[in-house]
Image (cartoon, helix red, strand yellow):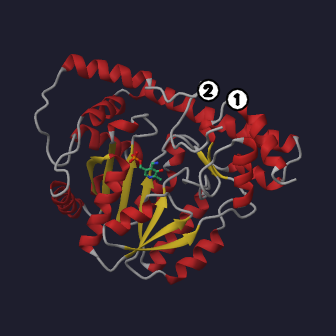
Amino acid sequence: MDLIVGVYRDASGKTPVMESVQEAERFLASAAESKSYRGLSGNLDFNDGIARFVLGSGHPALERQSTIQTVAGTGALRLIGDLIAKLSPQAKVWTTDPAYVNHLPIMAAAGLEVQTFPWRESETGLDFEAVVQALDGARAGDILLLHGCCHNPTGIDPSLEQWSAISRLCHDKGLIPFVDMAYQGFGDGVDADAAGLRLLAGEHEQMFVTLSCSKNMSLYCERTGAAMVIASEAGEAEKVRLSLEQIARANYSMPPNHGAAIAAYLFAHPEAWLKELEECRMRVCTNRQNLAAELKAIGAPEKFQCLERQKGMFSLLPLSSSQIERLRDEFAIYGAIGGRINVAGLGTQQIPLLADALKRVFD
Ligand code: PMP
């Protein structure tokens, strides 16, 4: 059982091209627009569409932000990392422990110092006390790198009250929020998933956002994403956009257009795409609920019930490294190092097998 891979899979184990994406591609082929160079900010319709998608139309921060298309979410992370290194090289980036596997390497490659704060379960959800305690060591001007939703690898998301407390903490300590949004639409729905980010954007004069269309449009290999900077006012945001363009120019110059053109089409004609995305989300939620229910039914340890309240494609199973080894050696169940499993990678018939194996490694 391969639960390592970091992509969505349907019930037949495939990662299909969405029908709405195929429709957009048919349109783009028939429109046959020029392949001439675009600007350094990439596809402007895409930039506008993704900014409205993440912030929600009508959000006041839309007036004081700049968004530029990047080489997917990874490219956006690097661009923002480079920008931070240019603007305030002394700033430390605080990232969750455990973290998305590429957060630390990208920020370190940009020349920034990285520190961690714990991101773990309490009895009811995120252990917020542990976050606050660790961030006691953060200094004004440091950057707080958070996952917008569906935390990778743990699946632990803050409640809205906790987002509010994070916002206050940033104000009190002078920290700048940086939200990496790679799974909007896979947790509680496209708007609910962005609620924390929208709250921070409304309450902070400065904020960084990185965005990816890899998962929610299933555009993985098209490398489609964006970097957004929110500033105190429109003129400031425009200045920062020019800095971002300079960094992009010295790196890859312009991002590729095809994925962004697809995404721009989907933002302009969202119905079919959002319906498909909702189907993916429901599949992940159903897998979670079924696995948690099966574990309960067979009397597995109570701590596995956290699976049910966690969000998105991943969960970090409460297993020791020797239990993870036993899963592999005795049951041929492969999760990532540390116990991360891709819940979307589970076939319906695999759920009872996984639940049984999870119980047995505790026997
Ligand atoms: N951020 C997080 C938290 C991720 O999990 C990922 C992909 N797994 C990314 C960013 C980058 O994704 P991509 O470069 O494919 O857009």
- Relative to 83, 52 lies left or right: right
- Relative to 209, 86 lies left or right: left
Q: Residues within 10 Å of mark 2 (few under 14, many from 20)?
A: some
Report the disc number at residue 11: 2
* Lower sequence index among marks 2 and 1: 2
Q: Nearer the viewer, residue 305 or 206?
A: 305
- The structure residue drawn at horizontal position 33% and vertical position 34%, both measured from the top left corner, is 263
- Relative to 234, 329 lies left or right: right
Whether residue 173 is visible, yes or no, is yes
Instruction: Tell me the kind of residue under disc 2.
Output: Ala
Q: Nearer the viewer, residue 247 or 1?
A: 1
- The structure residue drawn at horizontal position 65% and vertical position 54%, both measured from the top left corner, is 339
Residue 212 in which image quadrant:
top left
Residue 302 lies, with reference to residue 236, above or below; the image says above
Q: Regarding mark 1 in the picture, which secondary structure is present there?
A: loop
Label 1 CB-ligand 1 distance < 8 A: no
Count of numbered labels shown in the rendering: 2
Q: Position of residue 307 (x, y in %)?
A: 71, 48
Q: Position of residue 329 (x, y in %)?
A: 72, 47
Say which residue label 1 marks: 348
- The structure residue drawn at horizontal position 14% and vertical position 45%, both measured from the top left corner, is 39
Q: Regarding mark 2 in the picture, which secondary structure is present there?
A: loop
Q: Residues within 10 Å of mark 1 (few under 14, many from 20)?
A: some
Residue 20 lies, with reference to residue 308, above or below; the image says above
Q: Identify the residue at the far front of this view.
A: 329
Q: Are the residues tagged 2 and 1 within 8 Å (C-beta)? A: yes
Q: Position of residue 154 (x, y in %)?
A: 61, 55
Instruction: Tell me the kind of residue under disc 1.
Output: Thr
- Relative to 130, 353 lies left or right: right
- The structure residue drawn at horizontal position 27% and vertical position 44%, both measured from the top left corner, is 47
Q: Position of residue 260 (x, y in %)?
A: 29, 37
Whether residue 232 is visible, yes or no, is no
